[in-house]
Amino acid sequence: MQSAILRISSKTVVASLVASSLAFSNVIADTAWPISEDGAAAAGFTEQGITSLDSAMEEIVSKQDVAGMVWLLAKDGKIATYESAGLNAVDTQTPMTKESLFRIYSMTKPVTGVALMMLHEKGLWSFDDPISKHVPELANLRVLENYDADGNVATVPVDREPTMRELLNHSAGFGYGLSGGDPVNNAFRDTGVLASDDLDMLIDKVAEIPLLFHPGEEWYYSIAVDIQGYIVQKISGQKFGDFLNDNIFQPLGMSETQFFVNPEDKNRFAEVHNWDEERNRLVQRPHRTDRAGYMDPNRIESGGGGLVSSTHDYARFLQMLVNEGELDGNRVLSQESVRIMRTNSLRDELNVGGNSERAGQAGVGFGVDFAVISDPDAANTPASPGTYYWSGAAGTWFWVDPIEDMFWVGMIQAQGPRRPGADNMRNVSRDIIYDSLVN
């Protein structure tokens, strides 16, 4: 049955997906939510607790731990707090507001995961498929065996091909180039994988780089989700960004989420800052020149980290997940698909960040483009079992607690050095929130 489905022409698949997206768009309800607060009590929190939360976030901004922040907490579909503080840009003193736009970097990944799961629901791929079934360029992969200081590198064939499940939970063996001094990660940087012109070029470059380990052996944060975006594009027959817009952004009313910034929105686009020790203050980081900038509509549509979004839009995405696939009458995913996404799929002895030499993060596994807290005590968190989360390279972060029907999203733009003694805003906000729950 599945092989027959896979022989359907691209035009047939695209027609089906477009028809689905049109059905969604015809029933879009009020996309203004979230626009204002329902209040602490209405959302199930103490007034004192939410006041403390807002004060703590404002203090983090005032101490220059970050230039600006927008934060939102929702429970049972009610907004406990939705506030902003600080600046979009210190050089121009432009205020940060609820309308600010952000590089969400790796918070793009769950969006890509949702897109891929939509195609899974149509029977177009399965978790046990080898990746090469959908990306033939990634057949015949090799694995880094050893290397020395003189640049000698030895590789061996993979024990077996990595599967789609391993691609989704970062255990397939790919590198990324964000860290690591090994030949694999060096090759990602040297060949400019993340600076590729498009997804086709990215895949061609990745195909020439060996894996870090045999599939399934370790967890390693990787290029996997950019590969997922390519798979969405290839299976659907649509450009990746068009698929996201037609099937996720339009149905969910996420009109300000895309891979570039419109010229008229430039002033809303927050700058990235870091702490300058010599000047004893935050400074704006220079824009990268090694790849297309965010004002370029032709920049690569990176499923691993390319989206720009607003707090409003990402909150709608998260509420869809809280609702197990539905928002305002639009069902984007089935309940089963959302539950699969938030279920740990790593083998029992493997945690996020773990391998044969290190344990990784105790009590934390990985599902489909989310980290998942399987054991809160081991993870040292007040969050419920099954809480899932992720973050972006410029500091944006979110978590969803499915037991409490609750989510948090914090939007900042910060990379590089931080103020000495800066607060851990993620832990501060989390602890206050859970202490503020009624009952």
Image: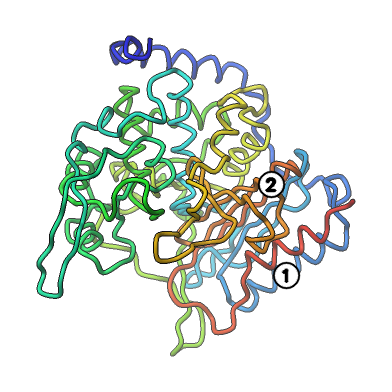
Give whichever of 133, 85 is nearer the camera: 133
How is the protein colored in the picture?
rainbow
Q: Amino acid at mark 2?
A: Asp
* Left or right: 316, with 243 as reference point: right
Q: Going 25% across and 55% down the picture, which residue do you hit?
A: 291
Q: Which residue is mark 2?
A: 401
Q: Position of residue 276 (x, y in %)?
A: 45, 82
Q: Going 70% across and 63% down the picture, which residue do you hit?
A: 429
Q: Which residue is mark 1?
A: 56
Give whichever of 69, 210 is nearer the camera: 210
Secondary structure type for disc 1 = helix
Q: Position of residue 260 (x, y in %)?
A: 38, 45
Give whichever of 401, 194 is nearer the camera: 401
Secondary structure type for disc 2 = strand
Figure quadrant of the N terminus = top left
* Left or right: 279, with 303 as reference point: right
Q: Going 63% across and 61% down the picture, which residue do you hit?
A: 379
Q: How many angstroms separate mark 1 from mark 2 (CA)?
A: 21 Å
Give whichever of 156, 331 is nearer the camera: 156
Q: Amino acid at mark 1?
A: Ala
* Left or right: 142, with 84 as reference point: left
Query: Among all residues in the image, which is located at the extreme bottom?
Result: 278
Nearest to viewer (mark 1 / mark 2): 2
